[in-house]
Structure formats: structure tokens, C-alpha cells
Amino acid sequence: MTTRYGRINIAAGLWVMVFFMLYGFLLIYWRDFGPGKEQWIASYNDGAHFESRLAHVHGNLFALLNIAFGLVLLNLKVPETLARWASWLALGGLLMPLGILSEVYLNFAPVLVIVGGVSITAATVTLAIGAGKAKQAA
């Protein structure tokens, strides 16, 4: 059953990575070719532009972490309960980059950023415990 969780994390990680890669291409367009690119470049290190880049980087990082978590869950016999918690918490970590985007574009409070950050940290701790308790493959 833990393989189900691993596959979910891998698939979600890959789809989130696709989204944030495309978002990165959009950021490049705005910086190099878009209307008002001079203004974009002038304010590149602060405000919404900086936050947008943070979302792009964290989105791809957390997507990679979900893929890595999925591979660990597929290859180690992590106890079922720990596997389920690690999987869902890692998926919850994806709220962080989505929360950054919601701050930038929708003026939301940073609640999702905090929830996502705590979630990915808790997922890492949970998976570390699960990996320590994993049974050896037969």
C-alpha cells in the first residue's frame, strides 16, 4: 500500500514541476521581452518580482522533494502509517509556493506559506523516522 503513496507524490511532483517550469518561462518573458521590461528589471530584487521568483524556485524545489519522497516510499518498506503521513504532509508542503503566488497575485495573507513550510518540514521528519523503521526488502 505504501507504493500508492509514493506514486501519488511522484505524479504530483512532476505536475507541479511542469507548472513552475512554465511559470519560470513566463518570468523570463516578462524580464526580457515583455512590455515594460525596463521597469521589471529596475525592481527585480524587491516586491512582487522577488516574491514571484521565490515561488518559482520553491515550487520546483518542493516538486523535487515530492518526487524524492515518492521514490523513497517506493523503495523502502516504511510502516504504513508513517508512509501515509509523510506522503500527505509532503503534498501539503506544496502549499508554500502556491501561497507565495496567492500573496503576489491575490493579496492573500501568508497563511498557506506557513502551513506549507511547516508541512514539508513535518514530512521530512516523518519520513526520516519511517526510513529508520523501514523493514529490509526480502
Image (spheres, rainbow, N blue to C red):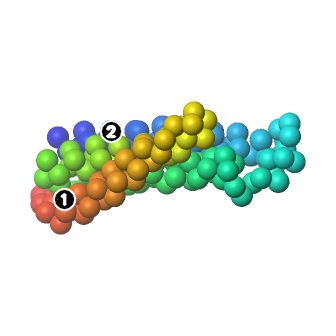
**Separation of residues labelled 1 and 2 (CA atoms):** 17 Å
Residue at the top extreme, as displayed: 106
Q: Earlier in the sequence, mark 1 or mark 2?
A: 2
Name the residue beneath numbered marker 2.
Answer: 8
- Which image quarter holds the N terminus? top left
Residue sitting at x 48%, y 37%: 15
Identify the disc placed on residue 130.
1
Please rate how many residues cluster around mark 2, counting C-alpha atoms within 10 Å: few if below 14, some from 14 to 19, many from 20. Answer: some
Residue sitting at x 13%, y 63%: 133
The amino acid at mark 1 is Gly
Say whether residue 118 is left or right of residue 136. right
Say whether residue 56 is left or right of residue 86. right
Res. 70 in view: no
The quarter holding residue 2 reads top left
Q: Please state which of residues 90 and 97 is positioned toward the viewer in this rendering.
A: 97
- Which image quarter holds the C terminus? bottom left
Is mark 1 in CB contact (under 8 Å) with mark 2? Answer: no
**Where in the figure is residue 6, as x and y percent of width and height?**
29, 45
